[in-house]
Image (cartoon, grey):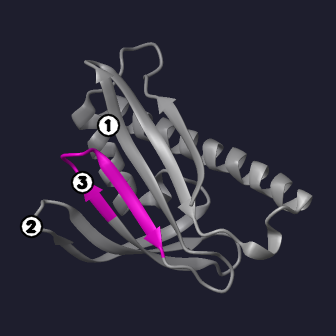
């Protein structure tokens, strides 16, 4: 079930936008080292990496957060041809199964966007609850702020290199 979707136009401050290749390399770096792009993540580890016959890179990533002892494992795929990053979390006692997608879009040459899509299994016990609706709206805002932080960090890295 789609929980949230939004899009960010990618443009470097006071410059033209980055190339599609440079932006993709930034997304690949984020996939392997999310702690360098999002401050809430303390560390990450990628393992069991392989490339499928279709050319899609797949690996498992363990992510640890600064807050508490929160950590989890997820499966990550990188489809360079399609410009698609996806992470899949199978769920646990605290959170439902979910998947997150970042998709590069270039409707015309030099006009780059990243579409962010959050899918998750619904929580039946809170559907229709007003508090749940407020919590969901706050989560959507937090996702958008996180995604903007990631894009800003990618652009900063691109401008430095």
Who comes first in sequence, dot 1 or dot 2? 1
- Residue 20 in percent (x, y) is at 26, 32
Q: Is residue 135 left or right of residue 109?
A: right
- The secondary structure type at the circle numbered 2 is loop
Judging by the rendered image, the residue that carries numbered circle 2 is: 53
Start-end of magenta stretch: 77-89
Residue 23 is marked as: 1
- The secondary structure type at the circle numbered 3 is strand
Q: How many other residues sit within 10 Å of disc 1, few (<14), some (14-19) or many (≥20)?
A: many
When asked about the image quadrant of residue 68, the answer is bottom right
Q: Nearer the viewer, mark 1 or mark 2?
A: 2
- In whole angstroms, how far apart are the C-alphas of marks 1 and 3? 14 Å
Who comes first in sequence, dot 1 or dot 3? 1
Quarter of the figure that contains the C terminus: top left
Please report the residue visible at 49 percent of the width from the left and 69 percent of the height from the top. 43
Magenta residue check for 81? yes
Please report the residue visible at 35 percent of the width from the left and 54 percent of the height from the top. 85
Judging by the rendered image, the residue that carries numbered circle 3 is: 79
Q: Is residue 62 left or right of residue 148?
A: left
- In whole angstroms, how far apart are the C-alphas of marks 1 and 2? 24 Å
Front residue (pair 144, 126): 126
| Relative to 35, residue 83 above or below | above
Magenta residue check for 86? yes
Please report the residue visible at 84 percent of the width from the left and 61 percent of the height from the top. 128
- In whole angstroms, how far apart are the C-alphas of marks 2 and 3? 12 Å
Who comes first in sequence, dot 2 or dot 3? 2
């Amino acid at each position: 079930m789609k929980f949230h979707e939004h899009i960010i136009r990618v443009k470097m401050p006071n410059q033209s936008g980055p190339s599609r290749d440079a932006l993709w390399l930034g997304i690949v770096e984020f996939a392997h080292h999310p702690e360098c792009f999002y401050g809430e993540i303390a560390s990450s580890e990628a393992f069991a990496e392989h490339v499928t016959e279709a050319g899609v890179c797949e690996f498992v990533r363990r992510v640890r957060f600064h807050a508490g002892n929160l950590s989890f494992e997820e499966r990550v795929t990188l489809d360079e041809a399609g410009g698609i990053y996806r992470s899949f979390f199978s769920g646990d006692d605290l959170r439902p199964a979910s998947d997150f997608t970042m998709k590069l879009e270039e409707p015309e040459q030099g006009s780059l966007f990243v579409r962010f899509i959050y899918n998750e299994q619904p929580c039946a016990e809170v559907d229709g609850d007003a508090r749940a609706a407020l919590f969901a709206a706050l989560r959507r805002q937090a996702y958008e702020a996180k995604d903007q932080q990631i894009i800003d960090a990618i652009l900063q890295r691109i401008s430095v290199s």
